[in-house]
Image (cartoon, rainbow, N blue to C red):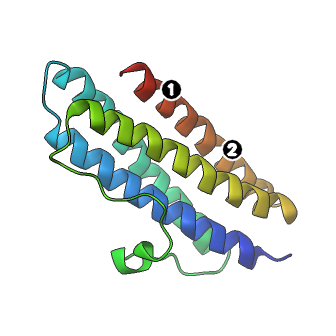
Amino acid sequence: MSNKLVVEALKKVLADSQALYLKTQNYHWNVEGPHFKSLHQLFEEQYTDLAEAVDEIAELIRALGEKAPGSWKAYDTIRTIEDGDEEATAVNMVKDLAEAQSSIQNTLQQALKAAQNVDNEVVIGVLVDRMSVHSKNKWMLNSSQ
């Protein structure tokens, strides 16, 4: 097995990370209700982390000798995370983001398996760290419901 499969898996992680970033920022901008301040801050913390993660994942792809996709057209064909609904209630935003955290964890798990198959310790380390972040994010979101 080659790094080609790792790169393809990382491209999916990148696409889902970008989609989750946009969804989280959308909800940060548009959340309303009695828990506005706490959710607004939580969403900001999560999308800020995702902005850094997107760059790290793209750079991993580049380090493996491939171009990182950088368009919504490219992401639309490989992402699993759907767009957010700015008209959603705060409760539904939180639920939607928690479900998206599960989706990205699945994408990360697939990429981790690909990296483990070629013993790419650098990619494995990044993916394990991302899985930890998304696990905590899911817990935070579920605890906010």
**Which class describes the residues within 10 Å of circle 2: few (<14), some (14-19), or many (20+)?**
some
Residue 119 shows in the view: no
Residue at image mark 2: 128
Residue type of the residue flagged with mark 2: Val
Image coordinates for residue 41, horizontal then vertical, percent: 26, 28
Q: In the rendering, which numbered label is found on residue 139?
A: 1
- The front one of 70 and 90 is 90
Residue type of the residue flagged with mark 1: Trp
For marks 1 and 2, the one nearer the N-term is: 2
Image coordinates for residue 59, horizontal then vertical, percent: 55, 66
Evaluate if marks 1 and 2 touch, with contact meaning CB atoms under 8 Å apart.
no
| SS for callout 1 | helix
- Residue at 69 percent across and 52 percent down: it is 109
**Which class describes the residues within 10 Å of circle 1: few (<14), some (14-19), or many (20+)?**
few
Does 9 sit left or right of 136 as displayed? Answer: right
- Residue at 53 percent across and 39 percent down: it is 134
